[in-house]
Image (tube, rainbow, N blue to C red):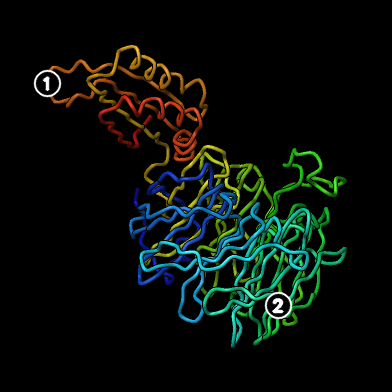
Amino acid sequence: MGLLLFSNLCFSQVSDNLTLYRTDFKNVSGDNTVSITSYTKNGKHYVYAGGAGDIDVFSINAQGKLGHIEKQEQYKKKGPARGMVADNINGTDYLFVANKYGDAIEVYKIMDDGALEQVFMIHDTEEIYIGIGITLQVVHMNNASYLFAGGLEEKPGLSCFKIEDDGKLTHVQSMKDDDKVHTDGIIGMFVHKIDGKTFLFTGGFQDNGISSFRVYENGKFKNINNIDDNDTDRFLTGAYPVTGVKLGDNHYVIVGHRHHKYYARGGFIKKTDFVYHGDAVSVFKVNKKGELTPHSVLKDNENTKLQGQTRIEIVSVNDKEAILAVGTRDDASIQLCKLNEQGILSPINYLETGFPIYYGLKSLKINDDYFLVAGSIEWGFRKIVAYKLGRKDSSTSGKVLRHVVSFKFKKDASQEKIDEVIASFENLKNEIPAIKELEWGLNNSTEGLSNGFNYCFTLTFNDENAREIYVFHKTHLIAQKKANPLLDAIFVIDYWTSN
């Protein structure tokens, strides 16, 4: 596929031609994947996928291949692990987890093999705001490190805890949400250090806005300023992912939103008189006082995939530009964008994943390569997927993608069961519009080289997006599940060809 090994020195020269290539996917223990984070320990890279009930631990190698290490059961078998962040505290590696419906923060020590060992847990009380825990953010000061936590629904607010060397959390300060600050539904947080000062930025999902806070050496914090949604130059209705980047002398905060129009649950949205004026990613500039000012927007159009943004990951940064990946729930895609030094976002490319992303998207760098690991909120999906960032292969222009699948059934598989499997795969063309063509046949070669592969399907796709939609489509996954117990082996090969 012409993958490119690139360094930061040449990154900006090829950034307009980047795309994503799937490298692997693995099953997870939970029914879905809500959040994903990663960590590097002793030169090895680990991925933590949290869903309903369990946290799965994976290794990921330089080729983007995933290996399952263990699963960790969450408190009360609840979850989902909505907020997850891994960090080093005075020489010890920890994973901090916001157990959304367990109303608790769990602290795990990361062992040498990436596995987890729980060392502490703190529960919600009337004084702190970690009920319906959503988002966590570690803030390192000169002499201590702090964990900030935000929640949703019944008890919105912002809380700070000092992280002790043994992983215990000591409460420092909590600020209850009010009509001024935007801390009702903190689904995203980010930290900037500017001229020796530390600033924390939060998005308020229910508040339809974003706030900035000054954080002091002792962990105490105060509100600096607040930016509301409007229907002209910012898009904050349902403020969701919050991230940031420094380019040159400029500090930016990037905010996405899953607009309230995408929520059908009655009573969940507090302010029901919202106006839908499109989907977009908003960029804010931060001054030396930590104040936010609206700067630019990237609006969704027919050439982008920005509907229902739920996660924004900074993939790479150099002095001149940053590459961002925007995960979407409603477009079921990963949109790649470029932010230049002037704070202007522009789209690069997108990949339709075939599954909706909630908060489960994480970028990581291994050697000189950049990867994304994604999971789906879709109930019963039970997979995480790894992608590698590379140069788009221009040689595929004007061609179609063939996907060839051959089955070798077990000797004791009945013809009735085999026919059921064949019928379910033949029916895929009726259920998945992304399939351009589908044909199949029974082997009649006389050369004796088929090695028992008697049934062959050939599918045609217009591009990689269509193939991803097919691979992870619910109907395809159901057909696979029906076939697997009957198969002795399966052979798959893809290739580009002229139509």
- The percent position of residue 18, horizontal first and vertical second, equals 46, 55
Q: Residues within 10 Å of mark 2 (few under 14, many from 20)?
A: some
Q: Give the secondary structure at mark 1.
A: loop
241 or 447: nearer the viewer: 241
Q: Mark 2 points at which residue?
A: 172
- The percent position of residue 484, horizontal first and vertical second, equals 35, 29
Rendered image quadrant of residue 261 = top right
Tell me the number on the disc at residue 383: none
- The percent position of residue 182, horizontal first and vertical second, equals 79, 63
34, above or below 472, in the image: below
99 or 320: nearer the viewer: 99
In space, the residues marked 1 and 2 are separated at their CA atoms by 76 Å
The answer to whether the residues at label 1 and label 2 have Cβ atoms under 8 Å apart is no
Q: Mark 1 points at which residue?
A: 447
- Amino acid under disc 2: Val
499 or 19: nearer the viewer: 19
414, above or below 257, in the image: above
Q: Give the secondary structure at mark 2.
A: strand
Residue found 59% across the figure and 67% down from its top = 340
Q: How crowded is mark 1: few (under 14 residues within 10 Å), some or many (20 or more)?
A: few
Residue found 61% across the figure and 56% down from its top = 99
Left or right, 9 with respect to 378, comes to: left
Q: Can residue 348 be seen in this view?
A: no
Rendered image quadrant of residue 264 = top right
Closer mark to the observer between disc 1 and disc 2 = 2
Left or right, 135 with respect to 474, comes to: right
